[in-house]
């Protein structure tokens, strides 16, 4: 259904065209029944186009925590840590800022996936009530759970750089158990892994937000808009922008990104071979229990997946659930 603003715009367009046509000498000299048919014939495609333009867009938001504006210590991202509740508030505010900008653009369906730690960090009652919300980390696709080909775009909020990145604030890939991850020979972090998954569905990542190193990292992979929220000082400290400055930029870049929406081509059309380097040879030993897994060296295993979904699920099993 069209919202009030869209209906006013539609009625105004029809009225203006009606007046223009009725005052046109060519129309005035036609018999009334013919002029009316002519008017309807012209108005119909315009009305149809207007309705098509106001069809709700569908946006998927994956929100991590380390890259949120205003978060400058690991304690702020950990349950029970000093100022963790402040971190939750900052995280929720950034999501709401982006959601507000999306709805300013027009009707939308928005799914938000809490993608940090135990994945129950966002303050539910303070989230914009117009969104749908996915929480809990017991989900096969983790940070991209709920994303499918029906979405028009993906937005990453609060992201961080890959494991081992120099000057990447709290940089890691999945967990501290991973020392490196490669997809068809390309080293990626969480942002890159999620981008590969989205691109396999034909859904573009239209905006990616996080620390400076993450922003540089994601731009090497895809030409997306970014918002830099902080600059790392080593891996455990950061020079921060004020949260209000970050929110303002998030809204501006979201609105700009929505004007450029288009389907994307997959980053690769080949089957996915992933290679993952873990923290201990024992974890690699356990990973070899998975049928089809190959051993590269003491710390590294690889697998030829039939598609990105299979690759993603197995990668998640290795870094999150394998124990001994």
Image (tube, grey):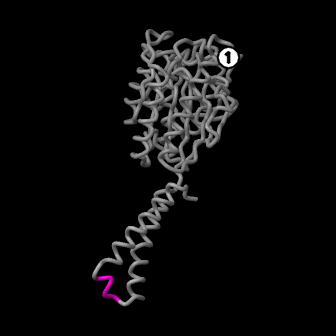
Q: Is residue 156 visible?
A: yes
Q: Residue at x 54, y 39 (%)?
A: 99
Q: Nearer the viewer, residue 27 or 181?
A: 27
Residue tagged 1: 79
Q: Nearer the viewer, residue 267 or 12?
A: 12
Q: Nearer the viewer, residue 132 or 214?
A: 132
Which of the 4 quarters of the picture holds residue 253?
Answer: top left
| Left/right of residue 137 with respect to residue 189 in the rendered view | right
Which of the 4 quarters of the picture holds residue 176?
Answer: top right
- In magenta segment, residue 42: no
Q: Residue at x 30, y 78 (%)?
A: 24
Region in magenta: 26-30
Task: Count the numbered circles shown.
Answer: 1
| Image position, residue 19 (x, y; %) | 37, 72
| Image position, residue 60 (x, y; %) | 55, 41
Q: Secondary structure at mark 1?
A: loop
Outermost residue, bottom side: 31
Q: Is residue 318 above or below residue 240?
A: below
> Label 1: how many residues lie within 10 Å, few (<14), some (14-19) or many (20+)?
some
| Image position, residue 288 (x, y; %) | 63, 24
Q: Is residue 295 visible?
A: no
């Amino acid at each position: 259904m069209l919202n009030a603003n869209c209906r006013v715009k539609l009625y105004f367009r029809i009225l203006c065209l009606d007046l223009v046509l009725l005052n046109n000498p060519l129309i005035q000299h036609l018999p009334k029944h013919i002029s009316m048919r002519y008017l309807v014939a012209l108005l119909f495609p315009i009305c149809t186009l207007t309705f098509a333009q106001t069809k709700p867009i569908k946006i998927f938001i994956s929100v991590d925590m380390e890259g949120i504006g205003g978060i400058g210590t690991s304690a702020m991202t950990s349950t029970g840590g000093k100022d963790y509740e402040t971190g939750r508030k900052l995280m929720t505010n950034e999501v709401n800022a982006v959601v507000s900008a999306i709805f300013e653009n027009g009707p939308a369906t928005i799914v938000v996936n809490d993608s940090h730690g135990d994945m129950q960090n966002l303050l539910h009652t303070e989230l914009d009530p117009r969104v749908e919300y996915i929480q809990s980390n017991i989900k096969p696709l983790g940070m991209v759970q709920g994303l499918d080909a029906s979405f028009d775009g993906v937005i990453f909020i609060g992201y961080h750089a890959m494991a081992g990145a120099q000057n990447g604030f709290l940089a890691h890939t999945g967990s501290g158990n991973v020392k490196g991850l490669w997809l068809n020979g390309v080293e990626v972090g969480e942002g890159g892994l999620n981008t590969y998954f989205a691109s396999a569905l034909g859904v573009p990542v239209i905006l990616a937000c996080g620390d400076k190193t993450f922003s540089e990292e994601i731009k090497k992979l895809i030409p997306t808009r970014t918002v830099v929220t902080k600059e790392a000082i080593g891996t455990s400290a950061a020079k921060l922008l004020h949260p209000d400055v970050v929110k303002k930029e998030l809204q501006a870049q979201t609105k700009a990104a929505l004007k450029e929406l288009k389907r994307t081509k997959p980053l690769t059309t080949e089957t996915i071979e992933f290679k993952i380097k873990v923290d201990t040879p024992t974890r690699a030993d356990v990973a070899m229990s998975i049928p089809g897994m190959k051993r590269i060296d003491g710390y590294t295993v690889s697998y030829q997946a039939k598609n990105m979904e299979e690759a993603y699920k197995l990668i998640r099993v290795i870094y999150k659930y394998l124990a001994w």
